[in-house]
Amino acid sequence: MQRRDFIKNGLLAAGTVALTGCNEESKAGDPANFKGRVAIIGAGAAGLYAGYLLQQKGADYVIYEASERIGGRVRPLKGFTDFEIELGAEQIHGKNSVWYDWVKSTTASFLDDKTTDFFQVGNQFKNQEQWRNDPDFQAAMRLAEQARSSPSSDVSLQQFVENNKLAQRVQHIVNAQVANEYGTSAGRLSVKGISEEDRLWSAGNDNLSVAGRTFLSILEEKCKDVLPKVKLNTPIAKIDYSGQRITLDDAQGQRYQADKLIITVPLAILRAGDIQFSPALPATKTDAIKKIGMDAGLKIFLAFNKRFWAADTGSIYGTGLVPEFWVASRGRSSQANLLTAFVNGSNAETLIGRGNAAVQTVVQELDAMYGRGVASGSLTNAYLMDWRKEPYIKGAYSYPTSGNSIATRQELSETVLRKMYFAGEATHLGGHSGTVHGAIESAQRAVNELFRDVG
Protein backbone atom coordinates (compact mmCIF):
# COMPACT_ATOMS: atom_id res chain seq x y z
CA MET A 1 0.00 0.00 0.00
CA GLN A 2 1.77 3.12 -1.17
CA ARG A 3 0.17 6.52 -1.55
CA ARG A 4 3.26 8.29 -2.95
CA ASP A 5 6.63 7.04 -4.17
CA PHE A 6 8.95 10.01 -4.12
CA ILE A 7 9.98 12.90 -1.89
CA LYS A 8 10.35 16.63 -2.24
CA ASN A 9 11.64 19.00 0.39
CA GLY A 10 9.09 20.60 2.66
CA LEU A 11 8.33 21.07 6.32
CA LEU A 12 5.24 22.36 8.08
CA ALA A 13 5.72 23.44 11.68
CA ALA A 14 2.79 22.62 13.95
CA GLY A 15 0.85 25.58 15.21
CA THR A 16 2.39 28.16 12.88
CA VAL A 17 0.28 30.45 10.75
CA ALA A 18 2.44 30.63 7.63
CA LEU A 19 2.80 27.45 5.64
CA THR A 20 6.04 26.19 4.14
CA GLY A 21 6.58 23.52 1.51
CA CYS A 22 3.00 22.59 0.69
CA ASN A 23 1.84 25.36 -1.66
CA GLU A 24 -0.91 26.40 0.75
CA GLU A 25 0.67 29.66 1.85
CA SER A 26 -1.26 32.86 2.49
CA LYS A 27 -0.05 36.06 4.12
CA ALA A 28 -1.75 36.30 7.49
CA GLY A 29 -3.12 39.45 9.06
CA ASP A 30 -3.22 40.24 12.76
CA PRO A 31 -5.68 37.95 14.59
CA ALA A 32 -6.11 40.65 17.21
CA ASN A 33 -7.96 42.71 14.59
CA PHE A 34 -10.78 40.18 14.46
CA LYS A 35 -13.40 40.31 17.22
CA GLY A 36 -16.19 38.34 15.61
CA ARG A 37 -17.30 34.71 15.81
CA VAL A 38 -16.08 31.97 13.49
CA ALA A 39 -18.31 29.00 12.72
CA ILE A 40 -16.70 25.81 11.45
CA ILE A 41 -18.81 23.14 9.75
CA GLY A 42 -17.41 19.65 10.26
CA ALA A 43 -15.34 18.13 13.07
CA GLY A 44 -13.05 15.97 10.97
CA ALA A 45 -9.31 16.52 10.85
CA ALA A 46 -9.68 19.81 8.95
CA GLY A 47 -12.37 21.23 11.20
CA LEU A 48 -10.58 20.26 14.40
CA TYR A 49 -7.30 21.71 13.20
CA ALA A 50 -9.00 24.95 12.19
CA GLY A 51 -10.37 25.09 15.73
CA TYR A 52 -6.92 24.32 17.12
CA LEU A 53 -5.42 27.31 15.29
CA LEU A 54 -8.26 29.62 16.26
CA GLN A 55 -7.94 28.47 19.86
CA GLN A 56 -4.25 29.37 19.83
CA LYS A 57 -5.06 32.85 18.59
CA GLY A 58 -7.78 33.44 21.15
CA ALA A 59 -10.56 33.67 18.58
CA ASP A 60 -14.22 33.01 19.34
CA TYR A 61 -15.37 29.96 17.41
CA VAL A 62 -17.75 27.02 17.40
CA ILE A 63 -17.68 23.76 15.42
CA TYR A 64 -20.93 22.26 14.13
CA GLU A 65 -20.68 18.51 13.53
CA ALA A 66 -23.57 16.75 11.81
CA SER A 67 -22.97 13.30 13.29
CA GLU A 68 -22.75 12.02 16.85
CA ARG A 69 -18.96 11.75 16.75
CA ILE A 70 -15.87 13.74 15.84
CA GLY A 71 -13.19 12.58 13.41
CA GLY A 72 -14.99 12.38 10.08
CA ARG A 73 -13.14 9.78 8.00
CA VAL A 74 -10.87 9.09 10.95
CA ARG A 75 -12.71 6.41 12.90
CA PRO A 76 -11.64 3.33 14.89
CA LEU A 77 -13.57 0.10 15.36
CA LYS A 78 -13.51 -1.43 18.84
CA GLY A 79 -14.34 -5.01 19.72
CA PHE A 80 -13.84 -6.69 16.36
CA THR A 81 -10.45 -8.05 17.38
CA ASP A 82 -7.94 -7.57 20.20
CA PHE A 83 -6.83 -4.17 18.93
CA GLU A 84 -8.72 -1.19 17.53
CA ILE A 85 -8.69 -1.08 13.74
CA GLU A 86 -8.98 1.98 11.53
CA LEU A 87 -12.15 2.11 9.47
CA GLY A 88 -10.84 5.07 7.48
CA ALA A 89 -7.42 6.66 7.29
CA GLU A 90 -4.71 4.42 8.72
CA GLN A 91 -1.34 5.36 7.23
CA ILE A 92 0.84 8.44 7.56
CA HIS A 93 2.11 9.42 4.13
CA GLY A 94 5.41 11.19 4.67
CA LYS A 95 7.16 12.70 7.67
CA ASN A 96 7.06 16.38 6.70
CA SER A 97 3.74 17.38 8.20
CA VAL A 98 2.00 18.48 11.35
CA TRP A 99 0.18 15.16 11.38
CA TYR A 100 3.40 13.12 11.51
CA ASP A 101 4.77 15.39 14.25
CA TRP A 102 1.61 14.99 16.27
CA VAL A 103 1.62 11.19 15.98
CA LYS A 104 5.32 10.98 16.77
CA SER A 105 4.86 13.05 19.93
CA THR A 106 2.39 10.55 21.42
CA THR A 107 2.79 7.03 22.77
CA ALA A 108 2.13 5.58 19.31
CA SER A 109 4.77 3.36 17.75
CA PHE A 110 5.59 2.93 14.06
CA LEU A 111 5.51 -0.56 12.55
CA ASP A 112 8.38 -2.06 10.61
CA ASP A 113 7.75 -1.39 6.92
CA LYS A 114 10.00 -4.17 5.61
CA THR A 115 7.48 -6.44 3.94
CA THR A 116 7.00 -8.51 0.79
CA ASP A 117 4.18 -7.93 -1.66
CA PHE A 118 2.46 -10.78 -3.50
CA PHE A 119 0.75 -10.65 -6.90
CA GLN A 120 -1.71 -12.86 -8.71
CA VAL A 121 -1.30 -12.97 -12.48
CA GLY A 122 -3.57 -15.39 -14.26
CA ASN A 123 -3.66 -18.54 -12.14
CA GLN A 124 -0.21 -17.98 -10.63
CA PHE A 125 0.49 -16.33 -7.29
CA LYS A 126 4.03 -15.20 -6.45
CA ASN A 127 5.92 -12.53 -4.56
CA GLN A 128 7.37 -9.54 -6.39
CA GLU A 129 10.87 -10.98 -6.61
CA GLN A 130 9.55 -14.20 -8.14
CA TRP A 131 7.91 -12.18 -10.91
CA ARG A 132 11.15 -10.39 -11.84
CA ASN A 133 11.63 -12.36 -15.08
CA ASP A 134 8.09 -11.85 -16.33
CA PRO A 135 8.19 -9.04 -18.95
CA ASP A 136 4.48 -8.23 -18.63
CA PHE A 137 4.76 -7.88 -14.87
CA GLN A 138 7.79 -5.64 -15.14
CA ALA A 139 6.02 -3.53 -17.76
CA ALA A 140 3.04 -3.09 -15.42
CA MET A 141 5.28 -1.95 -12.56
CA ARG A 142 7.06 0.54 -14.82
CA LEU A 143 3.80 1.85 -16.20
CA ALA A 144 2.43 2.43 -12.70
CA GLU A 145 5.41 4.70 -12.09
CA GLN A 146 5.18 6.39 -15.49
CA ALA A 147 1.52 7.22 -14.92
CA ARG A 148 2.55 9.47 -12.03
CA SER A 149 4.94 11.45 -14.21
CA SER A 150 3.03 12.01 -17.47
CA PRO A 151 1.58 15.54 -17.23
CA SER A 152 0.84 15.72 -20.95
CA SER A 153 -1.46 12.69 -20.90
CA ASP A 154 -4.91 14.17 -20.29
CA VAL A 155 -6.54 10.74 -20.44
CA SER A 156 -7.86 8.25 -17.95
CA LEU A 157 -5.46 5.76 -16.42
CA GLN A 158 -7.24 2.98 -18.31
CA GLN A 159 -6.73 4.76 -21.62
CA PHE A 160 -3.10 5.38 -20.68
CA VAL A 161 -2.64 1.65 -20.06
CA GLU A 162 -4.25 0.76 -23.36
CA ASN A 163 -2.27 3.38 -25.26
CA ASN A 164 0.90 1.76 -23.93
CA LYS A 165 -0.36 -1.67 -25.04
CA LEU A 166 0.02 -3.25 -21.61
CA ALA A 167 -0.95 -6.93 -21.60
CA GLN A 168 -4.44 -7.57 -20.28
CA ARG A 169 -3.14 -10.17 -17.79
CA VAL A 170 -1.35 -7.48 -15.74
CA GLN A 171 -3.55 -4.41 -16.16
CA HIS A 172 -5.10 -5.02 -12.75
CA ILE A 173 -1.73 -4.28 -11.14
CA VAL A 174 -1.71 -0.72 -12.45
CA ASN A 175 -5.31 -0.24 -11.33
CA ALA A 176 -4.44 -1.51 -7.84
CA GLN A 177 -1.23 0.43 -7.35
CA VAL A 178 -2.46 3.72 -8.81
CA ALA A 179 -6.22 4.12 -9.26
CA ASN A 180 -7.35 2.24 -6.18
CA GLU A 181 -4.81 4.13 -4.06
CA TYR A 182 -6.22 7.39 -5.35
CA GLY A 183 -9.73 6.33 -4.35
CA THR A 184 -11.21 5.28 -7.68
CA SER A 185 -10.95 3.08 -10.79
CA ALA A 186 -8.59 3.21 -13.76
CA GLY A 187 -11.33 4.42 -16.09
CA ARG A 188 -12.07 7.47 -13.93
CA LEU A 189 -8.66 8.69 -12.78
CA SER A 190 -6.79 11.40 -14.70
CA VAL A 191 -3.15 10.65 -15.49
CA LYS A 192 -2.44 14.34 -15.98
CA GLY A 193 -4.13 15.10 -12.68
CA ILE A 194 -2.13 12.66 -10.59
CA SER A 195 1.10 13.70 -12.33
CA GLU A 196 0.40 17.32 -11.46
CA GLU A 197 -0.39 16.49 -7.84
CA ASP A 198 2.63 14.23 -7.42
CA ARG A 199 4.95 16.98 -8.68
CA LEU A 200 3.66 19.19 -5.86
CA TRP A 201 3.89 16.51 -3.16
CA SER A 202 6.18 17.63 -0.34
CA ALA A 203 5.38 15.39 2.64
CA GLY A 204 8.02 12.73 1.95
CA ASN A 205 8.01 9.18 0.62
CA ASP A 206 7.50 7.20 3.84
CA ASN A 207 4.28 5.25 4.36
CA LEU A 208 4.01 4.63 8.08
CA SER A 209 1.62 2.38 9.97
CA VAL A 210 0.95 3.04 13.62
CA ALA A 211 0.38 0.77 16.62
CA GLY A 212 -0.58 1.50 20.19
CA ARG A 213 -2.87 4.42 19.38
CA THR A 214 -5.76 5.14 17.07
CA PHE A 215 -5.72 8.21 14.85
CA LEU A 216 -8.85 9.45 16.60
CA SER A 217 -7.23 9.24 20.03
CA ILE A 218 -4.36 11.38 18.72
CA LEU A 219 -6.76 14.00 17.37
CA GLU A 220 -8.56 13.98 20.71
CA GLU A 221 -5.31 14.42 22.62
CA LYS A 222 -3.94 17.23 20.50
CA CYS A 223 -7.28 19.02 20.18
CA LYS A 224 -8.43 18.53 23.77
CA ASP A 225 -9.06 22.26 24.19
CA VAL A 226 -11.09 22.29 20.99
CA LEU A 227 -13.48 19.48 21.87
CA PRO A 228 -15.65 21.56 24.23
CA LYS A 229 -16.35 23.87 21.28
CA VAL A 230 -17.80 21.04 19.16
CA LYS A 231 -21.58 20.87 18.91
CA LEU A 232 -22.48 17.31 17.86
CA ASN A 233 -25.65 16.15 16.09
CA THR A 234 -25.96 19.52 14.38
CA PRO A 235 -26.21 19.07 10.61
CA ILE A 236 -26.16 22.50 9.02
CA ALA A 237 -28.75 22.50 6.22
CA LYS A 238 -28.91 26.15 5.15
CA ILE A 239 -26.37 28.95 4.98
CA ASP A 240 -27.49 32.51 4.28
CA TYR A 241 -24.52 34.79 3.71
CA SER A 242 -26.42 37.64 2.09
CA GLY A 243 -26.37 39.88 5.15
CA GLN A 244 -23.64 41.42 7.24
CA ARG A 245 -23.55 38.29 9.40
CA ILE A 246 -23.89 34.70 8.26
CA THR A 247 -27.00 32.79 9.33
CA LEU A 248 -26.88 29.01 9.67
CA ASP A 249 -29.94 26.79 10.08
CA ASP A 250 -29.57 23.19 11.17
CA ALA A 251 -31.80 20.30 10.14
CA GLN A 252 -33.84 20.67 13.34
CA GLY A 253 -34.65 24.29 12.62
CA GLN A 254 -32.24 25.83 15.10
CA ARG A 255 -30.59 29.05 13.92
CA TYR A 256 -27.05 30.28 14.57
CA GLN A 257 -25.04 33.29 13.48
CA ALA A 258 -21.39 33.92 12.74
CA ASP A 259 -19.15 36.57 11.20
CA LYS A 260 -16.87 34.14 9.36
CA LEU A 261 -17.46 30.57 8.23
CA ILE A 262 -15.03 27.73 7.51
CA ILE A 263 -16.63 24.83 5.63
CA THR A 264 -14.78 21.51 5.90
CA VAL A 265 -17.44 18.97 4.88
CA PRO A 266 -16.50 16.20 2.41
CA LEU A 267 -16.80 16.96 -1.29
CA ALA A 268 -19.68 14.49 -1.71
CA ILE A 269 -21.79 16.44 0.79
CA LEU A 270 -21.40 19.62 -1.25
CA ARG A 271 -22.13 17.71 -4.44
CA ALA A 272 -25.31 16.18 -3.01
CA GLY A 273 -26.66 19.62 -2.16
CA ASP A 274 -27.11 18.69 1.49
CA ILE A 275 -26.28 22.29 2.38
CA GLN A 276 -28.34 25.00 0.67
CA PHE A 277 -26.61 28.34 0.12
CA SER A 278 -28.27 31.73 -0.19
CA PRO A 279 -27.27 33.26 -2.48
CA ALA A 280 -26.12 30.28 -4.54
CA LEU A 281 -22.40 29.61 -4.61
CA PRO A 282 -20.43 31.11 -7.51
CA ALA A 283 -20.63 29.08 -10.72
CA THR A 284 -16.88 28.44 -10.69
CA LYS A 285 -17.19 26.78 -7.29
CA THR A 286 -20.23 24.68 -8.16
CA ASP A 287 -18.47 23.57 -11.35
CA ALA A 288 -15.42 22.52 -9.33
CA ILE A 289 -17.64 20.56 -6.93
CA LYS A 290 -19.03 18.62 -9.91
CA LYS A 291 -15.67 18.05 -11.62
CA ILE A 292 -13.50 16.68 -8.81
CA GLY A 293 -14.10 12.97 -8.25
CA MET A 294 -15.16 11.19 -5.05
CA ASP A 295 -16.28 7.59 -5.26
CA ALA A 296 -17.57 4.76 -3.15
CA GLY A 297 -14.97 3.29 -0.81
CA LEU A 298 -14.96 -0.01 1.06
CA LYS A 299 -12.84 -1.61 3.72
CA ILE A 300 -13.68 -5.22 4.50
CA PHE A 301 -11.97 -6.67 7.57
CA LEU A 302 -11.51 -10.44 7.63
CA ALA A 303 -10.54 -12.38 10.76
CA PHE A 304 -9.16 -15.93 10.46
CA ASN A 305 -8.33 -18.64 12.97
CA LYS A 306 -4.92 -19.15 11.38
CA ARG A 307 -2.39 -17.28 9.28
CA PHE A 308 -2.22 -18.77 5.77
CA TRP A 309 -0.09 -15.98 4.26
CA ALA A 310 3.68 -15.61 4.53
CA ALA A 311 4.87 -13.99 7.75
CA ASP A 312 6.47 -11.01 5.96
CA THR A 313 3.47 -10.28 3.73
CA GLY A 314 2.64 -6.62 3.23
CA SER A 315 0.11 -6.29 0.41
CA ILE A 316 -1.65 -8.91 -1.69
CA TYR A 317 -2.76 -7.95 -5.20
CA GLY A 318 -5.36 -10.17 -6.85
CA THR A 319 -7.20 -10.23 -10.16
CA GLY A 320 -10.73 -9.98 -8.76
CA LEU A 321 -12.86 -7.17 -7.42
CA VAL A 322 -10.45 -6.48 -4.54
CA PRO A 323 -7.42 -4.66 -5.96
CA GLU A 324 -5.45 -4.93 -2.72
CA PHE A 325 -5.48 -6.78 0.57
CA TRP A 326 -3.07 -5.99 3.36
CA VAL A 327 -2.18 -7.65 6.66
CA ALA A 328 -3.82 -5.46 9.28
CA SER A 329 -2.46 -7.52 12.19
CA ARG A 330 1.17 -7.44 11.03
CA GLY A 331 3.73 -6.29 13.59
CA ARG A 332 1.23 -5.79 16.40
CA SER A 333 1.05 -7.30 19.86
CA SER A 334 -1.96 -9.28 18.83
CA GLN A 335 -3.19 -12.85 18.57
CA ALA A 336 -5.37 -11.92 15.61
CA ASN A 337 -4.94 -12.96 12.00
CA LEU A 338 -6.52 -10.07 10.17
CA LEU A 339 -6.61 -9.00 6.51
CA THR A 340 -8.11 -5.80 5.13
CA ALA A 341 -9.67 -5.69 1.66
CA PHE A 342 -9.38 -2.16 0.25
CA VAL A 343 -11.72 -1.36 -2.64
CA ASN A 344 -12.65 1.94 -4.29
CA GLY A 345 -14.53 3.11 -7.37
CA SER A 346 -16.48 0.81 -9.67
CA ASN A 347 -15.30 -2.37 -7.94
CA ALA A 348 -16.59 -1.02 -4.63
CA GLU A 349 -19.92 -0.23 -6.28
CA THR A 350 -20.12 -3.80 -7.60
CA LEU A 351 -19.39 -5.31 -4.20
CA ILE A 352 -21.89 -3.02 -2.49
CA GLY A 353 -24.48 -4.20 -4.99
CA ARG A 354 -23.94 -7.80 -3.87
CA GLY A 355 -25.12 -7.02 -0.38
CA ASN A 356 -24.53 -9.85 2.09
CA ALA A 357 -22.70 -11.85 -0.59
CA ALA A 358 -19.88 -9.29 -0.75
CA VAL A 359 -17.82 -10.94 1.99
CA GLN A 360 -18.22 -14.36 0.39
CA THR A 361 -16.99 -12.92 -2.92
CA VAL A 362 -13.92 -11.42 -1.27
CA VAL A 363 -13.01 -14.60 0.60
CA GLN A 364 -13.36 -16.65 -2.57
CA GLU A 365 -10.81 -14.36 -4.20
CA LEU A 366 -8.36 -15.25 -1.42
CA ASP A 367 -9.13 -18.94 -1.98
CA ALA A 368 -8.18 -18.46 -5.65
CA MET A 369 -4.74 -17.27 -4.54
CA TYR A 370 -4.00 -19.49 -1.55
CA GLY A 371 -5.88 -22.64 -2.44
CA ARG A 372 -9.41 -23.96 -2.42
CA GLY A 373 -11.03 -23.59 0.99
CA VAL A 374 -7.91 -22.15 2.64
CA ALA A 375 -9.40 -18.73 3.41
CA SER A 376 -13.09 -19.67 3.47
CA GLY A 377 -12.36 -22.60 5.78
CA SER A 378 -10.60 -20.44 8.38
CA LEU A 379 -12.75 -17.29 8.33
CA THR A 380 -14.17 -16.49 11.76
CA ASN A 381 -15.53 -12.97 11.42
CA ALA A 382 -15.95 -10.12 8.94
CA TYR A 383 -16.84 -6.44 9.05
CA LEU A 384 -17.68 -4.28 6.05
CA MET A 385 -17.25 -0.50 6.18
CA ASP A 386 -19.07 1.23 3.34
CA TRP A 387 -18.18 4.93 3.46
CA ARG A 388 -20.77 5.79 0.84
CA LYS A 389 -23.50 4.86 3.31
CA GLU A 390 -22.27 7.34 5.90
CA PRO A 391 -24.87 10.13 5.57
CA TYR A 392 -22.46 12.98 6.33
CA ILE A 393 -19.51 11.64 4.29
CA LYS A 394 -20.87 9.63 1.32
CA GLY A 395 -17.64 8.30 -0.13
CA ALA A 396 -13.91 7.67 0.11
CA TYR A 397 -11.80 10.72 -0.78
CA SER A 398 -11.26 13.08 -3.69
CA TYR A 399 -9.32 12.37 -6.89
CA PRO A 400 -8.59 14.24 -10.16
CA THR A 401 -10.71 13.51 -13.22
CA SER A 402 -9.72 13.99 -16.84
CA GLY A 403 -9.97 17.53 -18.17
CA ASN A 404 -9.29 19.05 -14.76
CA SER A 405 -6.25 20.13 -12.79
CA ILE A 406 -5.06 21.75 -9.58
CA ALA A 407 -6.83 24.85 -10.90
CA THR A 408 -10.11 23.02 -10.24
CA ARG A 409 -9.13 22.50 -6.60
CA GLN A 410 -8.16 26.17 -6.49
CA GLU A 411 -11.68 27.10 -7.59
CA LEU A 412 -13.14 24.83 -4.92
CA SER A 413 -10.96 26.43 -2.25
CA GLU A 414 -11.67 30.09 -3.16
CA THR A 415 -13.12 32.29 -0.45
CA VAL A 416 -16.57 33.78 -0.99
CA LEU A 417 -17.10 37.48 -0.18
CA ARG A 418 -14.32 37.36 2.42
CA LYS A 419 -16.83 35.52 4.60
CA MET A 420 -16.79 31.84 3.70
CA TYR A 421 -13.61 29.76 3.58
CA PHE A 422 -13.31 26.21 2.29
CA ALA A 423 -11.07 23.48 3.71
CA GLY A 424 -10.86 19.70 3.66
CA GLU A 425 -8.65 17.29 1.73
CA ALA A 426 -10.40 18.01 -1.58
CA THR A 427 -9.33 21.67 -1.39
CA HIS A 428 -5.62 21.00 -0.90
CA LEU A 429 -3.53 22.83 -3.47
CA GLY A 430 -0.16 21.18 -2.90
CA GLY A 431 -0.72 17.58 -3.95
CA HIS A 432 -1.79 16.22 -0.54
CA SER A 433 -5.43 15.54 -1.35
CA GLY A 434 -6.87 12.33 0.02
CA THR A 435 -4.73 12.43 3.18
CA VAL A 436 -5.15 13.43 6.81
CA HIS A 437 -2.19 15.77 6.64
CA GLY A 438 -3.66 17.34 3.51
CA ALA A 439 -6.89 18.04 5.40
CA ILE A 440 -4.91 19.63 8.22
CA GLU A 441 -2.87 21.79 5.86
CA SER A 442 -5.99 22.95 4.05
CA ALA A 443 -7.42 24.09 7.40
CA GLN A 444 -4.29 26.08 8.03
CA ARG A 445 -4.66 27.76 4.64
CA ALA A 446 -8.30 28.62 5.38
CA VAL A 447 -7.43 30.14 8.76
CA ASN A 448 -4.59 32.09 7.13
CA GLU A 449 -7.04 33.49 4.59
CA LEU A 450 -9.50 34.40 7.30
CA PHE A 451 -6.90 36.38 9.25
CA ARG A 452 -5.58 37.89 6.02
CA ASP A 453 -9.03 39.31 5.36
CA VAL A 454 -9.20 41.02 8.77
CA GLY A 455 -5.57 42.24 8.72
Image: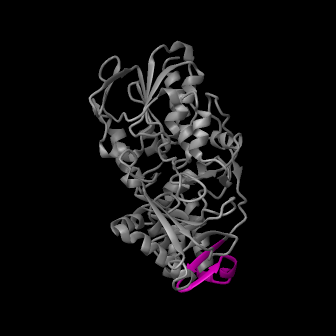
Q: Residue at x 44, y 19 (%)?
A: 37
Residue 54 visible in this rendered orientation of the protein: yes
Image quadrant where residue 415 sits: top left
Residue 23 visible in this rendered orientation of the protein: no
Q: Residue at x 41, y 53 (%)?
A: 395
* Side of 100 where 242 appears, left or right: left
Say above or below: 121 vs 287: below
Magenta region, residue range: 117-136
What percent of the width, then of the height, locates residue 124?
57, 85
Say above or below: 121 vs 419: below
What percent of the width, then of the height, locates residue 293?
41, 53
* Side of 278 where 158 appears, left or right: right
Say above or below: 261 vs 148: above
Of 100 and 193, the residue lying toward us: 100
* Side of 156 where 92 appears, left or right: right
Of 326 and 263, the residue lying toward us: 326
What percent of the width, then of the height, locates residue 325?
55, 68
Q: Residue at x 47, y 62 (%)?
A: 383
Q: Residue at x 54, y 76 (%)?
A: 378
Of 75 and 394, the residue lying toward us: 75
